[in-house]
Amino acid sequence: MQIEWAFKGVALAGRDRLLDCFPETAFDSPTRSTIALLEHWRSTEQRVRELARALGLPVPRRVQLDFEHMVHPPKGRGKPSCTDLMVISPDFVVAIEAKWTEPRYPVVEDWLDGTENRKQVLQGWCDLLELRAESRVATGDLHGLPYQMVHRAASACHQRKAASCRVAYLVFETTARARSECLEDLALLRDVLGSRSSLGMALAECSIEQSRTLNELRRQWESGERHLHAPVLRGLKGDGLLRTRLERVHCL
């Protein structure tokens, strides 16, 4: 299998080069989902095969792993959506959002501030969702969804040439509450797009085995240390901070 690493659409020569592209703040905390995601994809070919089979997709001969994949709002003015990982192959595309210790993000209704610009930004994401939806997507139907989920799903739909398109939430150390919230949000998004939508959705649950190094870094974090970038990066480039295992996948 031919595998290409990339960061924000720029191809890179390997995983270590990728790690150097992240800002220091990405690794200040030892429990950021970015860390778990990067460790999960250390066994790259195995993970590609695992993901494809779990989602009912063909195992690709070549694939690009684009971390922090950027899609700018088609309408209005705003920050680009940066999907944690976009898995791109000639046969399919999977937008992966990683979750570990982060709480549920604000919903669209709270994100909207009444300004014309944000209404336009939301409409732009709706236009992308309609590329894979059963019928027209009304902005009001999205008000109860996390805003992040909306633009992540829209970013997956932005890959217009993909024969198969999926959005998957990769959740580490899943709690019952986190599992329930994510499944409910994905089910609502499925209802909005329609049962015949060509955008597939999934929740992938992973367990974690932490190293002694990570346990110590977490102890330092809990003691008030807030600048752990250097030791976290050494762990990511070295033997690793944790090991993950895919436990189950819920496809909607």
Image (cartoon, rainbow, N blue to C red):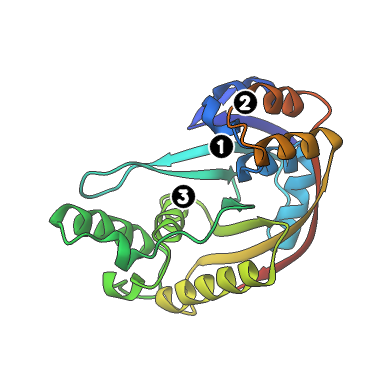
Mark 1: secondary structure: strand
CB of mark 1 within 8 Å of CB of mark 2?
A: no
Q: Which residue is drawn at 62% across and 67% down?
A: 178
Closest to the observer: 42 or 137? Answer: 42
Please name which of the two marks, 1 or 2, marks the residue nearer to the observer. 2
Label placed on residue 196: none
Q: Judge from the rendering whether residue 204 lies leftward or rightward of residue 215; answer left or right.
A: left
Label placed on residue 161: 3
Residue 74 in percent (x, y) is at 27, 48
41 to 59, vertically: above or below: above
Q: How far apart are marks 1 and 3 (CA)?
A: 19 Å
Per the image, the residue denoted by label 2 is 229
Q: Outermost residue toward the front?
A: 223
Q: How far apart are marks 2 and 3 (CA)?
A: 38 Å
- The amino acid beneath tag 1 is Phe
- The amino acid beneath tag 3 is Lys
Closest to the observer: 216 or 7? Answer: 216
Quadrant housing the N terminus: top right
Per the image, the residue denoted by label 1 is 67
Q: Which residue is drawn at 81% across and 32% down?
A: 213
Quadrant housing the C terminus: bottom right
